[in-house]
Image: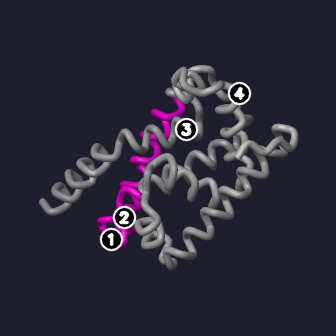
Amino acid sequence: MRDRTEDEQFIAVVQAYRQDLYRTAYAFLKSEESALEALQEVTYRAYKKRKQIRQSNYTKTWLIRVMINYCQDVLRKQTRKPTMAYYDEMTDGSKDFSETLLLDWAIQELREDEQTLIFLKYFHGYTYEELAKHYEVAEGTLKSRIHVCLDKLRELLNEKKGGRHDG
């Protein structure tokens, strides 16, 4: 009986974070089909390793990390081919398409750990405090890491734009 209750709890948790996991997969894989496949695979992987979660308040972060790792594995195995639907959704008519492509390219140029930091902070809205606790570092250390990532993004974007500095 206990196993059934644990299974039901796991299902409830995955359902609660389903949209966040899907958005994460879609941002990396650029396709609805690939994102849905990733969601299915990550649910299975997370279920197998659910005992690794140390604190339940980090479950969402842990699940997103599993998703990011899965997506990065998929991208390593294939040639990336972004779809127009992804960019249409990203631009939302409010941004210049070329700016969106450029930012996406720059983020992909970062190391995996840097991509994850940027993604958790700016795409999922985690606070510095939450991220510091998750990474088990001081908040100042985390802020420095994010600042370094943002500097790298700025440098990449300025190089790609031909050395212009807009800010």
Look at mark 2 in the image and give the residue it sits on.
Answer: 58
> Nearer the viewer's eye, disc 4 or disc 3?
4
Tell me which label, 4 or 3, sits earlier in the chain.
3
- Residue 20 highlighted magenta (yes or no): no
The image shows residue 146, relative to residue 40, as above or below, that is below
Residue position marked by numbered label 1 in the rendering: 55
Residue at 45% over, 52% down: 64
**Crowding near the residue tagged with mark 4, few <14, some 14–19, many ≥20 C-alpha atoms within 10 Å:** few
Relative horizontal placement of residue 151, taking residue 64 as reference (left or right): right
Sequence-wise first label, 3 or 1: 3
**Callout 1: 10 Å neighbours few (<14), some, many (20+)?**
few
Q: Is residue 105 left or right of residue 25?
A: right
Image depth: mark 2 or mark 4 in front: 4
Horizontal and vertical percent position of residue 48:
39, 58
* Label 2: few (<14), some (14–19) or many (≥20) C-alpha neighbours in 10 Å: some
Relative placement, left or right, of 137 versus 58 is right
The residue sitting at 73% across, 56% down in the picture is 152
Q: What's drawn in magenta, residue-wise? A: 33-61
Q: Sequence order check: which comes first, mark 4 or mark 1?
A: 1
- The residue identified by callout 4 is 98
Q: Are marks 2 and 4 in contact (CB under 8 Å)?
A: no
Mark 1 touches mark 2? (CB < 8 Å): yes
Q: Amino acid at mark 3?
A: Ala
Where is residue 68? Give x, y as percent: 54, 51
Cβ–Cβ below 8 Å for labels 4 and 3? no
Image quarter of residue 147: bottom right
What separation in Å lies between label 4 and label 1 (alpha carbons)? Answer: 41 Å
Task: Give residue 139's position: percent from left, percent from top.
Answer: 49, 74
- How far separated are the C-alphas under marks 2 and 4? 36 Å
User: Amino acid type of disc 4?
Assistant: Ser
Q: Which residue is mark 3?
A: 27
State the separation of the CA atoms marked 1 and 2: 6 Å
